[in-house]
Image (cartoon, rainbow, N blue to C red):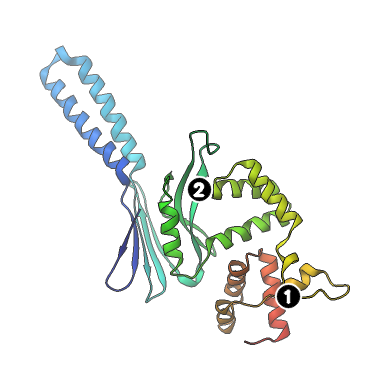
Amino acid sequence: MKIKQHLDGSIEAVADGGGLAKFLLGGGLLLSGLALYHFRVGAANAEQFIGSVCAAALFLGAFLVTYENASFVFKRAARIVVWRRRTLFSRHSGQVAFSAVECVAAEAIVDHEPGTGGGLSRRLVLRTATGVIPFTRAYSGDPDGELLRLAAQLNALFGRDPKAEILGRIRELVAAGRENDAVRLIHAERGIPLKAARAEVRSLKLDPPDAHLTDMQAEPGTDIGHQARHRLTLPPDAMAALARDNKIEAIKCVRVAHGLGLKEAKDVVEAWLTSGKRE
């Protein structure tokens, strides 16, 4: 994945198929030439001809499956993301407004436990209000964290914090009783052992985010978590969204800013609207 900066201020993330696809294509063409040579030599090299044909077919078939070209252009002036992704057999494209983008995330899968010779494979994805748009279909090794740095660079365009967004998703899963899913998400996103991920989930259950906010005092007979959510302040981008009568966008901004779940963020926004606060 490469980043290009254009003269108009837009930023483009490009995936050109990578070294593996180029290696497979080059190997397939080389083996095809070798097969042609054995064919011209004649029957004396029949075994070599058959072996070359099979090897060439294997390389070229792998190239057909793995080849992918993608471009995501982040246009600052128009505040949209224009994207396209194509393989040899399909093409997809579209555009997304900046306001509909939650974050750019380095989505991860764990090959096996860290420390046993494996590690994380990642791909960049664009998380939006309506779903996830992968930059590429395939995951790739990211031993030096390059994709994490690219994600941080692109998120700076939106003022988004993917870590807070992921924490909000984890808290939603814990609140819904889906602790195993929360463990798997922590395990995949951070690459830590399952035992450590389970410990983090247990700590979230015992220490919910609202219980230790310091800018309030609990009123007698009032649930502190409920009161905490209703006294959280709205970030500027959430207030700007409400000024445009975009309540959904405001809820999303609160989720990202405070790391809350969907219901908690909705409570904050509704409490702010009900109280009539204006900053």
Q: Is residue 88 visible?
A: no
Rendered location of residue 177, percent (x, y):
74, 52
Say left or right for 211 vs 80: right
Q: Image point 49% across, 36% down: which residue?
A: 118
> Residue 29: which quarter of the image?
top left
- The reply to whether callout 1 and callout 2 are in contact (CB within 8 Å) is no
Rendered location of residue 234, percent (x, y):
63, 77
**Amino acid on which disc 1 is placed:** His
Query: Residue reaching furthest right?
Result: 221
Q: Is residue 41 visible?
A: yes
Given residues 99 and 220, the one toward you in this image is 220
**Amino acid on which disc 2 is placed:** Ala
Q: Residues within 10 Å of mark 1 (few under 14, many from 20)?
A: some
* Gap in angstroms between the C-alphas marked 1 and 2: 34 Å
Given residues 74 and 112, the one toward you in this image is 112
Quarter of the rendering occupied by the C terminus: bottom right
SS for dot 2:
strand
Q: How many discs mark residues in the rendered view?
A: 2
> Residue 40: which quarter of the image?
top left
SS for dot 1:
helix
Q: Reading the chain from its start, which is encountered first: label 1 or label 2? A: 2
Rendered location of residue 252, percent (x, y):
59, 69
Q: Residues within 10 Å of mark 2 (few under 14, many from 20)?
A: many
Q: Image point 28% across, 26% down: which residue?
A: 55
Residue picked out by circle 1? 230
Q: Which mark is residue 125?
A: none
Q: Image point 70% across, 67% down: which residue?
A: 264
Say left or right for 43 vs 61: left
Rendered location of residue 110, percent (x, y):
52, 41
Say left or right for 100 vs 24: right
